[in-house]
Image (spheres, grey):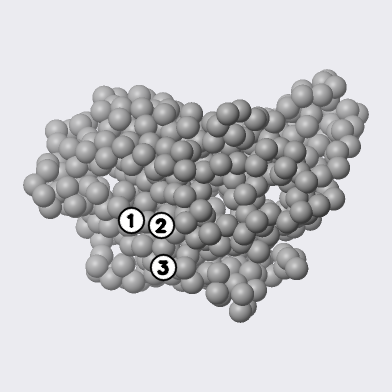
Amino acid sequence: MTTKPTLSFWQIWNMCFGFLGIQFGFALQNSNVSRIFQTLGASVDDIPVLWIAAPLTGLIVQPIVGYLSDRTWTRLGRRRPYFLIGAILATLALLVMPNSSTLWIAAGLLWILDASINVSMEPFRAFVGDQLPTPQRPTGYAMQSFFIGAGSIVASVLPYVFAHFGIANTAATGVVPDTVKYSFYAGAAVLFGAIAWTVLSTREYAPETLHAFSDATATDDAIPPTDSARSAASGLVWTLAGAIATGAVWYLGVDKQLYLIAGMITAYGLIQLAASAQRGGFLVDVLADLRAMPATMRQLAVVQFFSWFALFAMWLFATSAVTSVHYATHDAASAAYNDGANWVGVLFAAYNGFAAIAAMLIPPMAQRLGLRITHLINVVLGGIGLLSFLVIRDPRWLLASMVGIGFAWASILAIPYALLSDSVPAKKMGVYMGIFNFFIVIPQLCAASLLGFLLKTFFAGAPIGAFAIGGASLIVAGLCTLRVKEPA
C-alpha cells in the first residue's frame, strides 16, 4: 500500500477549474429559466412542474454516469471523457435555449441542458476523491465551491450588466430579451473553455494504481448481490403504495403536482421489480450498492434533503417573489418585471460571491471546529438569510440576506462531500457519488411537487412563502448534521 502524493495548489486549481464552467451554465439556468418560462406564457403555478426536468435528469443521469465512469479507462482517462462529452452537449443547449419560440421547446431544452451538465458534473465529484489524499479532500471540495461561486457571480449578473451597456432588456410579448440571449451565448463559451482546460491540464491514475493506494478502504470488497425475492417483495410494496397515493390524489382532488410524489414511489417499486428479474447489470448493482451504502451516507441523506429542498424553493420562486413583492408587478412583459428579474440575477451573483469568500474560510473553520459544527453554523446562517426576505421590503437590502445564503451554499457544496468521501470505497467512488446525488435531486422533486400545494394552503399562493419554508428547512438541515459521524 502507498499513500497518494500531496498535490500542489495549482494542480488542485487545474483539476477543479472545470467547475467554473459547469456552474456558469447552472447559474444561468437557475437565475433565468423561470424568467424565460414566464416570458413564454407560463403562470407562477406552472413553474414547479416545468422545473421538474432539472432534478429528474440528475436522478437518472448521475448514477448511470457514475457507474459507467467507474468502469471506464481510455486515453483521456476515467472521468475526463465524460467531462468533455457533457461540455459539448451543454454548450449547444445554451446556444439554442434563449431562442425558444414556445414554452414546450424551452422546457425540452431545459431537459437537454440539465442532462448535459450532469454528465460533466457527476465525475467531477468523484475526480476529487480519486486524485486527492484524504487530508486534502476538504480543500479540493472547497476549491470546487470557490469556482462555483466565482462562475455564478459573473453568470448571474450578466443580464444586469448587459442592460447597463444599452442592450435591450425588454422585448415583444413571448420573446426573450437580448440581455438574456447574450448571457447564454457567453455562458456557452465559458462552460466549454473551462472544462476543456481541466481535460487538457490534468492526468488520472490508472485503475490498478488507484486501487493500490492506502485510502482504498476495506469496503472495496464486492458487495453481496441483491436478493431477488427481497427486491420483488419490496417492489410490490412500493408499487402498491404508489398506486394508493395516486388514487388518493385523484379522489381528494388536491394539487395535481402531488402526482409527482406518487409517481416517484411507483417508479421505485417498478425498478425493484425489474431488478428482481435480472441476474446482474446496472440496476442490480446500483440497488445492491444503495442498500449497502455506508452509515455516514444514510445520515447525510437527511441533511441533504432539507438543504436542497430549501435551495430549490429559492431558485423556483425568487423571480416571482421579488418581482411581486419588491417591484409590485405580475406582468412579465413590463419594464418593472424585467428590472426585478435582473435584480434577482444580481442577488444570485451576490450569494455566490459570498460563497466564494466562504469557500476560503471553510477549511480553517473545519480544522478548528470540525466539519459538523462548521456546517451547522453555515446552513443556519442561510436559513436566517432566507427568512429575512419576509421582512425586508427595500430590494437593495436583500443583498444583506445573501451573506448567510452564500455561506450556506459554499458549505452545502463542500462539507457533505468531505464527510462522505472517506467512507466510500475507491472502486465505487463514481457510483456512490451518483447515488449520493439521489439525496440532492429527490428533495428537489419533492419541492417541485409540494411547494405549490404548501403555498396555496398556508400562504394564499404568495411566492414569498417559499422563503419561509426554505429558511425553516435549512435550519433543520443544520441540526441534522449533528447526527453525522465526524471522520477521523
Residue 343 position, x and y percent, is 25, 56
* Mark number, residue 357: 3
Q: CA distance from mark 3 to mark 1?
A: 12 Å
- Could you classify mark 3 by the number of other residues whose Cα lies within 10 Å: few (under 14), some (14-19), or many (20 or more)? some
Q: CA distance from mark 2 to mark 3?
A: 8 Å
Q: CA distance from mark 2 to mark 1?
A: 6 Å
Instruction: Say what secondary structure mark 1 lies in.
Output: helix
Q: Are marks 2 and 1 in contact (CB under 8 Å)?
A: yes
Please tell me how many numbered marks the rendered image carries.
Answer: 3
Q: Residue at x 15, y 44 (%)?
A: 169
Horizontal arrangement in the rendering, residue 454 relative to residue 435 (left or right): left
What residue is shown with label 1? 153
Of residues 235 and 209, the one nearer the viewer is 209
What residue is shown with label 2? 149
Instruction: Say what secondary structure mark 2 lies in.
Output: helix
Q: Are marks 2 and 3 in contact (CB under 8 Å)?
A: yes
Of residues 198 and 302, the one nearer the viewer is 198
Q: Residue at x 76, y 44 (%)?
A: 211
Q: Residue at x 65, y 30 (%)?
A: 73
Amino acid type, mark 3: Ile
> Can you say whether 271 is above or below 389 in the image?
above
Q: Residue at x 47, y 56 (%)?
A: 10
Residue 298 position, x and y percent, is 74, 53
Upstream in sequence: badge 2 or badge 3: 2
Quadrant of the drawing holding the C terminus: bottom right
Amino acid type, mark 1: Ile
Q: Is residue 422 visible?
A: yes
Q: Is residue 54 visible?
A: no
Image quarter for residue 291?
Answer: top right
Of residues 384 and 262, the one nearer the viewer is 384
Horizontal arrangement in the rendering, residue 368 relative to residue 425 (left or right): left
Upstream in sequence: badge 3 or badge 1: 1
